[in-house]
């Protein structure tokens, strides 16, 4: 994947975000800011923008961000993440995204798949933060119905994907051969 860097990359990120903001505002003016159509459009536009961000700005969060704690997969299962995965399979999303994950069903492709889960998690975390900002803005304006739709879209499009990526990485960790201790330690 080609990555741009420097000020051109950052300028594109902010220019793209301004474009997303403008398109979302225009959508809100046409369909209204307080319903599901606006919430869906805002999140879809932000997800498209995030694809550019991952290519344009080489952000490398600390490794500890991606460490899945032992209690996480159980919590995410209780919150319904496996049902969410079934829904994604049913609508064809996993088949659509299969090529982007780098996983071809062989053990040798597991590192590429793990890297794809990290990239997807980072992207959805970034978008969850922006989505939370939208919810906070709606709450500040006392637009409760808009806040509710935006919160629901944020949970569905951003939070559940993060939980799913972390659940999948926990499964991958179990498939990885045990690491050998360094000699002499």
Image (tube, rainbow, N blue to C red):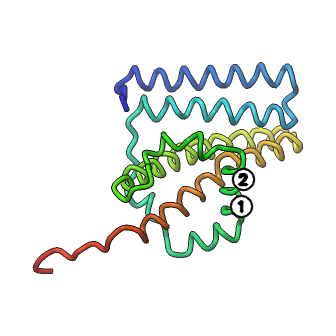
The alpha-carbon separation of the residues under discs 2 and 1 comes to 6 Å
Q: Left or right: where does residue 53 sit relative to residue 152?
A: left
Q: Residue at x 47, y 45 (%)?
A: 101
- Residue that label 1 marks: 83
Check disc 1: other Cα within 10 Å, few if <14, some if 14-19, many if 20+: few
Label 1 SS: helix
Relative vertical location of residue 9 with respect to residue 162 in this rendering, above or below: above
Q: Position of residue 85 (x, y in %)?
A: 66, 56
Relative vertical location of residue 98 with respect to residue 70 in this rendering, above or below: above
Q: Which mark is residue 38?
A: none
Q: Residue at x 67, y 44 (%)?
A: 92
- Residue that label 2 marks: 87
Q: Can you name the residue that lies furthest to the left here?
A: 184
CB-based contact (under 8 Å), mark 2 and mark 1: yes
Relative vertical location of residue 4 with respect to residue 181 in this rendering, above or below: above
Label 2 SS: helix
Check disc 2: other Cα within 10 Å, few if <14, some if 14-19, many if 20+: few
Q: Residue at x 42, y 67 (%)?
A: 173
Which quarter of the picture shows residue 145? top right
Which quarter of the picture shows residue 111? bottom left
Depth order, front residue of 4/82: 82
Q: Left or right: where does residue 120 sit relative to residue 74?
A: left
């Amino acid at each position: 994947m080609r990555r741009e860097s420097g000020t051109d990359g950052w300028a594109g990120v902010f220019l793209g975000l301004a474009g997303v903001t403008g398109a979302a505002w225009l959508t809100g003016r046409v369909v209204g800011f307080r319903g599901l159509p606006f919430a869906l459009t805002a999140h879809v536009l932000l997800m498209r923008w995030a694809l550019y961000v991952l290519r344009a700005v080489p952000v490398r969060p600390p490794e500890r961000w991606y460490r899945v704690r032992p209690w996480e997969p159980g919590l995410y299962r209780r919150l319904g993440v496996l049902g969410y995965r079934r829904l994604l399979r049913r609508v064809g999303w996993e088949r659509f995204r299969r090529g982007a994950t780098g996983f071809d069903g062989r053990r040798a492709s597991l590192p590429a798949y793990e890297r794809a889960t990290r990239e997807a998690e980072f992207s959805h975390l970034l978008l969850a933060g922006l989505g939370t900002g939208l919810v906070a803005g709606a709450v500040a304006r006392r637009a409760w119905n808009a806040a509710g739709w935006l919160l629901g879209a944020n949970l569905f499009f951003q939070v559940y994907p993060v939980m799913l990526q972390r659940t999948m990485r926990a499964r991958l960790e179990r498939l990885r051969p045990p690491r050998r201790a360094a000699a002499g330690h």
